[in-house]
Image: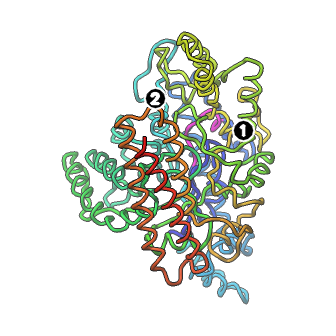
């Protein structure tokens, strides 16, 4: 039973590493990143010590250590979360503060919340309340995230291991072998080999009741991608239980820009074509199961459509639920200011709380070569800049999770590493470039940051664990929406904000989430044009023209939607329409500039 209409997405590598242990007993779904098995092992040891659970270290000398570390960590979090949930429901000697919190953070419209109030207002019938709790309360899902392309090959000495020992494959196996009944969120694009590997694990298939123990969730930025990936998996007898639509640019972490397709029209397409999508994929799915001689469900299995990226008010939250019929809304980076839910060291939390628009920017610091949302003045970038000044470029690359580049070596190396940057600058020195061009190319090389370490360090600092291997530098990747949340919050405060019982955003100049995304896309388009205007060719011009066309169509869509609304966005509707017209004019200027090149 889904108690909440929001979920907490994965954030960084360490920020939600133990979020399920903090919120699952309260009925909130959340996501653990499986990138860093070294970090997971350190946190597992900490919790084993804390809760007096026997701990047996899984060292790198143990075969398949990465998968085993992940399985062990997920099993521990599952067991501890279940104990908290069981304790919460134990009302033998009265109801606990945790049980009160469970109901307090539900929306005021919740029938269950009202029932609990009525039952406990003048004493309570123990057996009746027990029955209500057993029947209606459920844990939040303990989900995991795998970045499909972060699938580094691994070696023993100089011998390459089989594909199933690649990083993403091992992470998948670690999850598949765990006792969790939850979802794996696959992000960062399609990895056919990884998707094919999922066929080997029975927990991804429906049982005789049509239930799937381990569900597949695809994080996508458009309908076409969802359809292609959904069909690919269906041909293997694997069902996608959720399509998680994320704004291409108005989100945190890595930003996967669409070709100018905006979130509203994309959500409308999912809403309008949901049944068509389900039926088309169901036919492929049941044919594949028949070939495997597996159980074949008579009717299509459930499919959720969820959305995330830039939502910041209760009105926007409700609009996504009502207008686009999404099943849940992801609230990400505002939760970094909620210590009850996420794991952020105090220094980073303070930086996030004081961050304004100019402090949050789309950068090229990620070694993956994908635009990356960044916070100015984060300590990992400060650490990197100090080393550049000393002439000591690049990271020592202690974890090598994104050691994927093979320009210079047979084994992959990370573009943020000392080894890669040394080789790349040596190559640059042979090109005979002008001083200005050399400087630009040099900056592109040295700006890469060791994100796979920096995005996990906050958890080590928060829990006062050893950072000798990692260093103290923290990378953080909040989305633009972070600028409008400016204080540390309790779980009650943020849930009241989400459900409209209060408002923690004190600024009155926050643009609507759809307008903010439009502005970001226009800025992105302008930067792309500026980047290539001196070397324009037909291919680039066609790409930029298509981008302009899609943005214009998105604006027209919004003008129709917001122009016809009667009660929703009542106080901001006129400003939204003005902003849309302004965006259209700016696009016209960009289009003219493009035509004149």
Q: Which mark is residue 264?
A: none
Report whether 533 appears left or right of 127.
left
Occupied quadrant, residue 513: bottom right
Pick the residue in front: 387 or 52.
Answer: 387
- Percent position of residue 271, x then y: 37, 67
| 154 falls in the magenta region | no
Residue at image coords 53%, 83%: 567
Residue at the (77%, 60%) spot, across then down = 487
Asked if residue 452 lies left or right of residue 63, the reply is: right
- Magenta segment boundaries in residue numbering: 32-41
Q: What label sits on residue 166 in the rendered view? A: 2
- Picture layout, residue 142 above or below residue 573: above
Q: Which residue is mark 1?
A: 474
Inspect this view and state whether residue 182 appears: no
Q: Nearer the viewer, mark 1 or mark 2?
A: 1
Q: Around disc 2, counting alpha carbons within 10 Å, would you say few (fewer than 14), some (14 to 19), or many (20 or more)?
A: many
Question: Residue 500 appears in which quarter of the rendering?
Answer: bottom right
Report the residue that reaches farthest toward the bottom: 122
Q: Position of residue 191 (x, y in %)?
A: 39, 38
């Amino acid at each position: 039973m889904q108690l909440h209409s929001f979920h907490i997405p994965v954030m960084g590598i360490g920020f939600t590493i133990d979020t399920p242990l903090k919120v699952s007993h309260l009925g909130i779904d959340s996501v653990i990143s499986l990138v860093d098995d070294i970090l997971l092992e350190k946190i597992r040891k900490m919790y084993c010590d804390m809760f007096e659970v026997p701990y047996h270290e899984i060292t790198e000398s143990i075969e398949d250590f990465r998968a085993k570390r992940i399985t062990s960590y997920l099993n521990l979090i599952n067991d501890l979360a279940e104990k908290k949930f069981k304790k919460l429901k134990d009302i033998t000697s009265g109801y606990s503060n945790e049980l009160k919190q469970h109901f307090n953070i539900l929306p005021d419209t919740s029938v269950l919340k009202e029932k609990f109030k009525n039952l406990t207002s003048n004493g309570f019938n123990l057996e009746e309340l027990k029955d209500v709790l057993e029947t209606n309360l459920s844990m939040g899902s303990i989900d995991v995230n795998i970045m499909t392309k972060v699938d580094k090959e691994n070696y023993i000495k100089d011998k390459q291991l089989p594909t199933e020992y690649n990083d993403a494959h091992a992470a998948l196996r670690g999850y598949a072998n765990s006792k969790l009944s939850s979802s794996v969120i696959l992000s960062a694009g399609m990895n056919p080999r990884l998707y094919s590997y999922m066929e080997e694990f029975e927990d991804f298939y429906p049982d005789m009741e049509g239930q799937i123990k381990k569900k597949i969730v695809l994080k996508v930025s458009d309908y076409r991608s969802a359809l292609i990936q959904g069909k690919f998996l269906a041909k293997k007898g694997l069902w996608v239980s959720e399509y998680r639509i994320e704004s291409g640019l108005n989100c945190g972490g890595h930003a996967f820009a669409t070709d100018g397709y905006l979130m509203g029209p994309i959500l409308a397409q999912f809403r309008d074509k949901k049944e068509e999508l389900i039926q088309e994929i169901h036919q492929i799915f049941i044919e594949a199961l028949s070939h495997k001689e597996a159980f074949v469900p008579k009717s299509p299995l459930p499919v959720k459509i969820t959305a995330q990226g830039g939502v910041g008010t209760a009105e926007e939250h409700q609009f996504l639920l009502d207008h686009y019929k999404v099943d849940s809304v992801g609230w990400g980076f505002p939760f970094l200011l909620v210590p009850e839910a996420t794991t952020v060291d105090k220094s980073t939390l303070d930086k996030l709380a004081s961050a304004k628009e100019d402090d949050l920017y789309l950068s090229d610091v990620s070694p993956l070569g994908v635009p990356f949302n960044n916070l100015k003045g984060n300590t990992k970038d400060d650490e990197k800049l100090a080393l550049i000044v000393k002439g000591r470029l690049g990271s020592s690359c202690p974890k090598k999770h994104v050691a994927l580049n093979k320009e210079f070596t047979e084994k992959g190396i990370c573009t943020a590493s000392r080894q890669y940057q040394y080789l790349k600058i040596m190559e640059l020195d042979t090109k005979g470039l002008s001083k200005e061009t050399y400087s630009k190319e040099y900056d592109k090389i040295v700006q890469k940051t060791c994100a796979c370490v920096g995005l996990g360090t906050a958890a080590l600092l928060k829990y006062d664990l050893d950072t000798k291997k990692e260093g103290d530098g923290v990378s953080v990747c909040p989305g633009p929406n972070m600028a409008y949340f400016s204080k540390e919050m309790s779980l009650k405060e943020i849930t009241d904000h989400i459900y409209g019982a209060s408002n923690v955003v004190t600024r009155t100049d926050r643009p609507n989430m759809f307008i903010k995304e439009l502005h970001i896309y226009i800025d992105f388009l302008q930067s792309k044009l500026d980047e290539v205007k001196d070397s324009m060719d037909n291919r680039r011009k066609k790409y930029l023209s298509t981008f302009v066309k899609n943005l214009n169509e998105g604006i027209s869509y919004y003008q129709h939607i917001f122009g016809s609304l009667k009660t929703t966005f009542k106080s901001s509707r006129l400003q939204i329409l003005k902003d849309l017209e302004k965006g259209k004019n700016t696009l016209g200027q960009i289009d003219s500039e493009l035509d004149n090149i």
